[in-house]
Amino acid sequence: MKVNIIGGGVSGMTAGIYLQMNGFETHIFEKHAIPGGLCTSWIKGEYIFDSCAHWVLGSDTGSSFYKIWNEILDMKNIRFHKPRCTCRSGIEENVNKYGENTFYLYTNLDRLEAYMIDLAPEDTRAIKAFMKPIRVMQKFDLPPILDDVPFIPSLIRGIKMMRYLEFLYWFLKIRNYTNLTYAKNLKTFFFGKVSNYSMMVMKST
Ligand SMILES: Cc1cc2nc3c(=O)[nH]c(=O)nc-3n(C[C@H](O)[C@H](O)[C@H](O)COP(=O)(O)OP(=O)(O)OC[C@H]3O[C@@H](n4cnc5c(N)ncnc54)[C@H](O)[C@@H]3O)c2cc1C
């Protein structure tokens, strides 16, 4: 049996792979000259413009999504770039105690916390309160949706999910929080500006 797929983006190509794995013949119709859809990049001069996938859920080998990716990609041969900072922000008309107007959002939470406390010891309490839910959420791993999970493994997985109650608690607590709400709790003027995205000029690293 043949299946025609319209669109050669990630969805269309993934559908094609799974259909072929299950014995179907497939034909992908793509209106653009190249496949990839939104997930694409292009070269101009000496630069590569990578328009998407700056963040991929499941790049860590231990993650549940890694197993799913592995069904369609050879994950061990994909090199992921793990940046030191997710972004650096230039804050207009303001500097920190070192005279810099750039804020670095480090990916390593311990480093980020130490950096922020160094810049604003008077905000230590607010900074630690900010880090706590992030640390809880970091432990959260979306379980893959697999067919025919046997009863015992499924029960064990259900029991393990009890630890996500902490996540639920934090989610309910901070769900109405915005960067502006957070900025209001900060004594350091520099951080108030950082947290207020409307005053920031974002530069990707
Ligand atoms: C700037 C940016 C950053 C992103 N960052 C991330 C990220 O960090 N992590 C992440 O997981 N996701 C990210 N995404 C989202 C991710 O790229 C998209 O969700 C994903 O690529 C969508 O794939 P898709 O196949 O569903 O749709 P699309 O990529 O839109 O593919 C649809 C395809 O169908 C084709 N098409 C449409 N109509 C027709 C037609 N009539 N006939 C034939 N072909 C047709 C189009 O040309 C296109 O190629 C980002 C997206 C953008 C734009």
Image (tube, grey):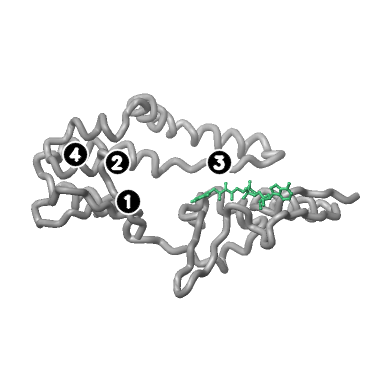
Observer-nearest of 12 and 197? 197
User: Which residue occupies 18% across, 54% down?
Assistant: 101
User: On the rendered image, what quadrant is the C terminus found in?
Assistant: bottom left
The first of marks 3 and 1 along the sequence is: 3
Do the residues bearing badges 2 and 4 touch, measured as CB atoms within 8 Å?
no
From the image, state whether disc 4 or disc 1 is nearer to you: 1
Any atom of ligand 1 within 8 Å of the CB at mark 1? no
Do the residues bearing badges 3 and 1 touch, measured as CB atoms within 8 Å?
no
- The residue carrying pointer 4 sits among few (fewer than 14), some (14 to 19) or many (20 or more) residues within 10 Å by Cα, namely some
- Pointer 4 residue: 192
- Pointer 3 residue: 143
The first of marks 4 and 1 along the sequence is: 4
Image position of 95 (left or right of 43): left
Observer-nearest of 31 and 187? 31
Q: CA distance from mark 2 to mark 4?
A: 10 Å
- Pointer 2 residue: 197
Q: CA distance from mark 3 to mark 2?
A: 32 Å
From the image, state whether disc 3 or disc 1 is nearer to you: 1
